[in-house]
Amino acid sequence: MAKEATAKTAETLAKEQRAISVSEFFEKNRHLLGFDNPTKALLTVVKEAVDNSLDACEEARILPDVKVIIKPLEENVFRVTIEDNGPGIVKQQIPHIFARLLYGSKFGRGKQSRGQQGIGISAAVLYSQLTTGKPAIIYSKPDKNKKTHMVELKLDTTKNEPKILKEEDLEDGLKHTGTKIILEIQGKYIQSKHSVDEYMRQTAIMNPHANIRYENAAGEKSDWKRTVDKLPPLPKEIKPHPHGVEMGILERMAHNTDSRTVANFMQNDFCRVGSTSAEEMCRLAGIAPNAKPRELTSEQVRKLYDAIQKVKLMRPPTDCLAPIGEKMLEEGLKNETKAEFVNAVTRDPVVYRGNPFQIEAAIAYGGDLAKTQSGEVASDEAVQQPAKLIRYANKMPLLYEQSSCALTKAVQGVTWRRYGMNQPGGGLPHGPAVIAVHICSTWVPYTSEGKEAIASYPEIIEEIKLAVQEVARSLFQYVSGIRKTEDRAKRQKLFEVYIPELAGDLAHLTGEKKEKMEEGLKKFLKKNVAKIIEEGGDNGEAAKE
Amino acid sequence: MKKKLTAFGKTIATQAAAAENPTMDVPIRALSNIKYDKGTGLITMGEKTAKRFFFNIAHVKKFVQTVAVARVSKGLSEENKSMSLRQVFYALRRTLPGTNIDIVDEQTESDAAVEDLELMTDALREQLRINANKSGSVAGKVVIEDRGDTIDWSKLGSGGWSVPSNVESIKFKKIEAKFVVYMEKAAMWERLNEDKFWEKHNCIIISSQGQATRGIRRLLQRLSTDHNLPIYVLTDFDPWGFYIYSVLKFGSISLAHISERLAIPKAKFLGLSADDVERYGLGRHKIKFKDVDHTRLKQIEKYAWFKDNKEWQRQFEMMKKMSAKVELDAIVSKGISFISEKYLPDKIKEKDWLE
């Protein structure tokens, strides 16, 4: 028995290895892919397609027009249509992008984009196929003078290859360049904080440069008009920064590099390393600068890793990040919330483990947020609800796992009382407010593959706190400014109502004409109003002998 | 009086009509503005005044309240009627149109406005036709006349005669009593009344509940100065009790301007003193001092009229050491009628008092 068990060779093993079908892969990983339940599945399908559309438009420098329609077909079956005005997709690529898992250019590149893994949209196609058996229908028009190409696609689950069911060029397809995808899926439509509706709202906030039209499963139409006619800058790709590389990855990079010497390896494969820094690292690690990186022992890699931490380097370049920007964030938030006060801040980029990241925070306050659904100004009590927190990573709304997310923890970690807001139980502040926090990074540290919550790195928490405090401070100034104005108005009113009282009493006392005294008092108030309401009036209880 | 009130209003009215900031000079009723006259043994008021402006956010309310009281007072004098302080409070109470602001929120505000007006018009509250509630009880061998009624203080049963706010018009028709015992506790008065202490010892017993009212003070003063009766004072052994005696004898800080009409320089303190607590073994009825008691004691020992009084300073020292107070009522622990049969007769006989 023992002999048999140890006798397995590579050959016998190979015989046992069989191709795991992609449907099996999908079944095993559906929770990681965002299809754990029918509610989330519907959201994920919309999300993957919308993310792709927005990414494509931005990369092609086109102001995005995105249209999303969710049409119920029968109970728990929906037809989801997403159309954009992006660059379209060339004919040959369509099958691979939509009907092949793990195909894409986004995986692991040093560039900020919404999708990171190249798995999303094809997983949506596969999910559709597995739940309704219907093919995905793709329309694409890369050239506005040419015909629209239409493809009906399925995914061959045994081979992980696209299967084209139907393909044709249409004379009257899309009216502009772009892509349109239609999927029929099983799902569940809800209207709550985890809903597609909420996702669309939050997407509109983060993309004020986009026209977004949305028709939900209840047939209600929303239309978020573009309020900013400028695209956010396009992020650039960067090489990893030495301070952000973990030891195992450093070892793998060293062994796979094309560079011949360690000094060259450090300079070529990383950013922000010049010859001086590279030699300094080698010296500190006790490694010859011309040693071959492929031959470094694990011990040497460890020494190199330690040496890297000791050498001061410029921060990674930040043009690899694409924050949305203070003005755009304010526009987006204002447009959606119709708040009375909006303030946003974009922090300077910082590094956690050598990965550049950047935090943006915004706060919206009052206005429609302080109104009931019927449009009346809500009572103070109603206003004393927890503020709404919306979280974004690389411009994508995060709807699930709010409580375990670093963004939430950081916002709760702010002492809101200092900014004039109640914070019962140390949670979210209470008041008619929406707080938005955005982290953008070349590599967003999610807590899990589900990509719903950000891991709590101290550097990240700290940055978020600083950003949120900044907007909280400006809100506080605004609110106390209003209170001051209100106080002033109150003071003036006080005298205005006291004047007739005093004049009346004096008239009784003296028999003089009330009107005459009222007139005199009003005259004095008018003349000295600033002094009286600003400083309280003439000198205080000055004692005199 | 009407003239005084009209004059008071006229000054303000003239300023108002001339589009000036109406102001009034209010004498300051505080420790900082009183003097102790060693010669007369009285607390008197200094000359300090504070300007109160209508157009000042911190003054406007008080300003309007004071004028409103003047108006009410003038009305009373026109109709030849009077009102209690409580009724003045209600007479002033009205909500300003379009606001939730009231002219007065608490009676303490209208009471203070009345006192300010007294000072500014140089008139007594009674002249303004505003009275406090009658209070306290009196019994003894005295016959008086009050608004045409003849009243014998020895024939009023268990309740005694209540002292009105204004005792100016009371006429003493016959006084057989030889001295007066005043006490701050109504319960102690009832004890002495039940024991017919006033009959046995031919005296007058008077009580208040807490600080003596103006009516009681004026009544005691008249008995002391006009009729030459010794006035003996009984209070709790605590800073507040000592201050009740202080007010009776030297006058009060807030009414320093009328000390000559209220104070009784000949009043004698008959207990409870620190020595009484020891002599009568009341130590086991001590109530521990709280922070407020310590604070109050510290204030009192610094008052000018106590500062150089060695005997009183000794009392303050001993009280501080005990860091406790003893209530007058604790004496019943020595026997129900111990106070009337032993304590008072002994103390008076032995002249065991403080001045």
Image (cartoon, rainbow, N blue to C red):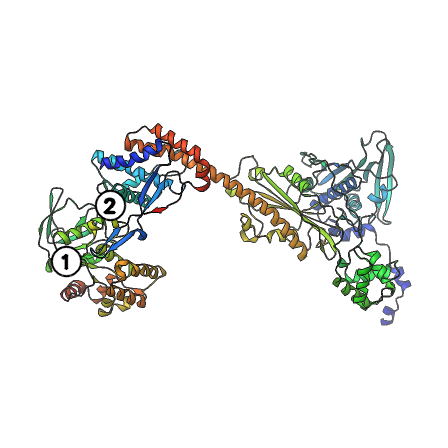
| Nearer mark to the viewer, of 2 and 1 | 1
Q: Secondary structure at mark 2?
A: loop
Q: Closest to the observer: A89 or B83?
A: B83
Quadrant holding the N terminus of chain A: bottom right
Image position, residue B130 (x, y; %): 24, 41
Other-residue count near label 1 (Cα within 10 Å), few / some / many at <14 / 14–19 / ≥20: some
Tell me which corner region of the image, top left, top right, bottom left or bottom right, holds residue A178.
top right
Subunit ID for the residue under disc 2: B
Q: Closest to the observer: A184 or A465?
A: A465
Instruction: Please report the residue visible at 27 percent of the width from the left and 44 percent of the height from the top.
Output: B119
Residue denoted by label 2 = B132
- Extreme-right residue of the structure: A11
Tell me which corner region of the image, top left, top right, bottom left or bottom right, holds residue B240.
bottom left
Above-or-below relation of B240 to B66 = below
Tell me which corner region of the image, top left, top right, bottom left or bottom right, holds residue A281.
bottom right
What amino acid does circle 1 point to?
Pro
Mark 2 vs 1: CB contact within 8 A: no
Give the label on residue B230, or none. 1
What amino acid does circle 2 point to?
Ala
Q: Secondary structure at mark 1?
A: loop
Image position, residue A237 (x, y; %): 80, 49
For residue A58, say whether it is visible. Answer: yes
Q: State the CA–CA distance, disc 2 to disc 1.
A: 26 Å
Image position, residue A213 (x, y; %): 71, 35
Q: How many marks?
A: 2
Q: Closest to the observer: A75 or B340?
A: B340
Q: Is residue B121 left or right of residue A406?
A: left
Image position, residue B261 (x, y; %): 20, 49
Q: Is residue B118 left or right of residue A145?
A: left
Subunit ID for the residue under disc 1: B
- Extreme-front residue of the structure: A545
